[in-house]
Amino acid sequence: MADIVFGFGASHGPLLSTPPERWDLRAADDRKNPAHPFRGKVYNFQDLADLRQDEKDFHAEMSLEMRQKRHERNQAALDQLADKLAEVDPDIVVVVGDDQHEWFLNEVQPSFTVFCGDQVINAGLTEERLKAKSPGIQLAMKGYFPPEDHVYPVPKELAEAIVEGAIADEFDIAVSIEQPTGPRGVIGIGHAFGFICRRILRDRPVPIVPILLNTYFPPNQPTPKRCYQLGRSIGRAIAGWKGPGADKRVAVCASGGISHFVVDEDFDERMLTAMKNRDTDTIFAEPDIVFRSGTSETKNWITVAGILSETDLQMNLIDYVPAYRSEAGTGCGMAFASWE
Ligand SMILES: [Fe+2]
């Protein structure tokens, strides 16, 4: 029987891998974006800035001094999580992240997918891959992807046990057995997984089980309630995994969130507190329309909160850092938590 010994959640936004003096590059992307989802409505940049002008002094929030302080806090929290994971030294890490048109394109977009192959590759960063991104993202890419290919073993017996548990619990879950390929060979794991491999696993080839959610793309994003319930099923499947080699210590990870690219501190506090208190009423009552754009990645956390609700581990918020980068309050609500 496997044992869930540790859980953690980490934001993975591009600002985490961008020097604070260059956060304005991502603000330039925000200014060009005509559709910022915020609390169930959609705004262009100027309308968003007008709407929020009395909420906070965002010019002060985005000052270089403030950005530097926040960058230091972000890095300290990431270091703390990476050190802790090295100390716990789990046999397997189950990573819940979203696929953002990285593996799954318009041919098919499953709500939930468990990767059940033998290994996954965090593909090396090529010039070509870099050039396809905006200048702000280019700067951050090294935080997600290594200079050369890194291979991570996948314990497929556990991945299959998770699928079998989900099917028994009436989730019609998708399975991927082979990493997709494109004209230039294997398509590397997506940003949600790459960031954890680089920044928290520090490129060590720890066996991982990737679980991919479609949080971003309509119309088949799973609801917060469905994510939490799938999480509970995954938690039971891990604990109930039997057979040769099943005597493993497992860590569980949520990648991404919380609110972005419009920071909503109220939302972040409400969700983080509800997850800590196992307050499913609050989580399930949050309207699905709020979970749009990067904020949708909160569903990765909700899934992991569901997994860990099947254990005695308690959530501890290491830090919450509202990383603002523009006068419209765009940026990323960075959260870092452990379950111990
Ligand atoms: Fe993301």
Image (tube, helix red, strand yellow):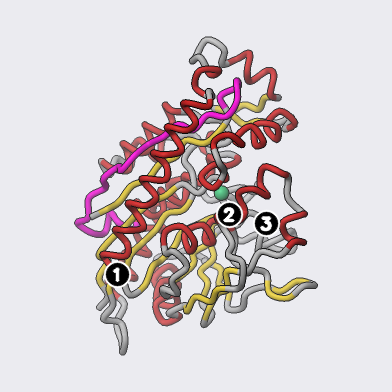
Give the CA distance from mark 3 to mark 1.
31 Å
Query: Could you tell me residue 287's position as x and y percent?
Result: 49, 34
Which-is-in-front pick, marks 3 and 1? 1
Q: Amino acid at mark 2?
A: Asn
- The reply to whether the C-beta atoms of the residues labelled 3 and 1 are less than 8 Å apart is no
**Residue placed at 61% from the left, 47% from the top?**
216
Q: First in sequence: mark 3 or mark 1?
A: 1
Range covered by the magenta-colored residues: 307-329
CB atoms of marks 3 and 2 within 8 Å: no
Identified by mark 3, the residue type is: His
* Viewer-side residue, 237 vs 127: 127
The residue labelled by disc 2 is 214
- The reply to whether the magenta stretch includes residue 312 is yes
Quarter of the view holding residue 185: bottom right
Relative placement, left or right, of 48 versus 85 is right
Query: In the shown orientation, is residue 314 left or right of residue 95?
Result: left
Q: Which residue is mark 1?
A: 89
Q: Is mark 3 within 8 Å of ligand 1?
A: no
Q: Is residue 186 above or below residue 339?
A: below
Q: Where's the N terminus, which quadrant?
A: bottom left
What residue occupies the far right of the structure in this picture? Answer: 183
Quarter of the picture holding the C terminus: bottom left
Q: Residues within 10 Å of mark 1 (few under 14, many from 20)?
A: some
Identify the residue at horizontal 49%, vertical 15% (top origin).
56
Residue 122: quarter of image: bottom right
Q: CA distance from mark 3 to mark 2?
A: 9 Å
